[in-house]
Image: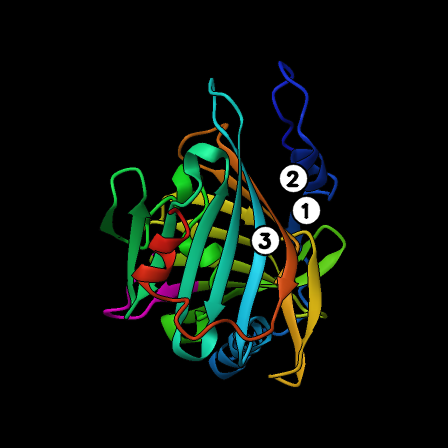
Amino acid sequence: MPRRSPPTSRPPTLLLALALAAPIAWCAPADAQGEALSTEQMVDLLKVVDDRQRNSGDYKSLAYIEQREKDKELMVYEAVVYRRDADDRFMILFTRPKAEAGKGYLRIDKNLFIYDPTVGKWERRTERERIGGTDSRRTDFDESRLAEEYDPSYVGRETLGKFTVHHLKLTAKKDVDVAYPVLELWIDADSQNILKAQDRALSGKLMRTVYYPQWVKVFSESKGAEVYVPKEIHIYDEVEKGNQTHVVIRSVDLKSLPANIFTKAWLESQSR
């Protein structure tokens, strides 16, 4: 697949340069010798993907989110991501630019809320919420729940760039609230890392294409194992062509967080 280049009317920021430094993989059929995975094998593979991204304790990281939209100014955000995977706690707190500082998202009992400090109000949001108005979604920063939320089917064994991958099609389970009901994944057969994903509407319409060019491992003392974190995420809007979001994740910390951090009161206090 050809590299998607940024507009030439303005130079790329450092964040965009980092994101574009990794090659965008292309997809081609692999040889037909590979056998299809059974349903049990696919579920086991998704469980591996889920487990490796989860921490038995807490999670904190610094994320730089760069949003480029057609005919609009480039926007760059800095945010802190907090998670407590043991009980599905999740929060994003924006710290830059100044106009967005103090705004945040909080997941409580599977409900996603947004807080705007300029009006001092909370509003409930759906899983389709564009985080900070970008092309990113809550699931791009939260723990992975693929085996819990989707039923897999096998598309084929393919090549993605230099990698041999398992191409899976996932369909959301009944009564599960997800951003997109149909998800296609290209998972590296060797490393078992996701390299590419496509989000689709129930009709099959392609909504987003997402690339994961690099994963990093961080050792978790509470888990006693390594946790896999995407170093960069490249998100392309397939509905509004030309819109794209690049996420760079830095400063991953797996130490324990304060007990009361995942509350509306705590998030509100950060903007006072």
Q: Is residue 87 above or below residue 2?
A: below
Q: Are marks 2 and 3 in contact (CB under 8 Å)?
A: no
Measure the alpha-carbon separation of dots 2 and 3. 30 Å
Q: Are marks 3 and 1 in contact (CB under 8 Å)?
A: no
Q: Earlier in the sequence, mark 3 or mark 1?
A: 1
Characterize the local packing of mark 2: few (<14), some (14-19) or many (20 or more) Cα atoms within 10 angstroms.
few
**Three-letter amino acid code at the position of disc 1:** Ala
Q: Is residue 152 above or below residue 272?
A: below
Q: Are marks 1 and 2 in contact (CB under 8 Å)?
A: yes
Q: Residue at x 45, y 80 (%)?
A: 86
Characterize the local packing of mark 3: few (<14), some (14-19) or many (20 or more) Cα atoms within 10 angstroms.
many
Residue marked by disc 2: 1
Observer-nearest residue: 191 or 21?
A: 21
81 in magenta: no
Residue 138 figure quarter = bottom left
Q: Secondary structure at mark 2?
A: loop
Observer-nearest residue: 269 or 204?
A: 269
From the viewer's perspective, tell me whether residue 131 is left or right of residue 223: left
Residue 37 figure quarter = bottom right
Residue 158 visible in the displayed image: no
Q: Secondary structure at mark 3?
A: strand
Q: Secondary structure at mark 1?
A: loop
Residue marked by disc 3: 62
Measure the alpha-carbon separation of dots 3 and 1. 26 Å
Point out the image quarter for the N terminus: top right
Q: Residue at x 49, y 55 (%)?
A: 140
Residue 197: x %, y % from top left = 52, 54
Q: Nearer the viewer, mark 3 or mark 1?
A: 3
State which region is magenta: 170-180
Residue marked by disc 1: 25
Q: Residue furthest front?
A: 272
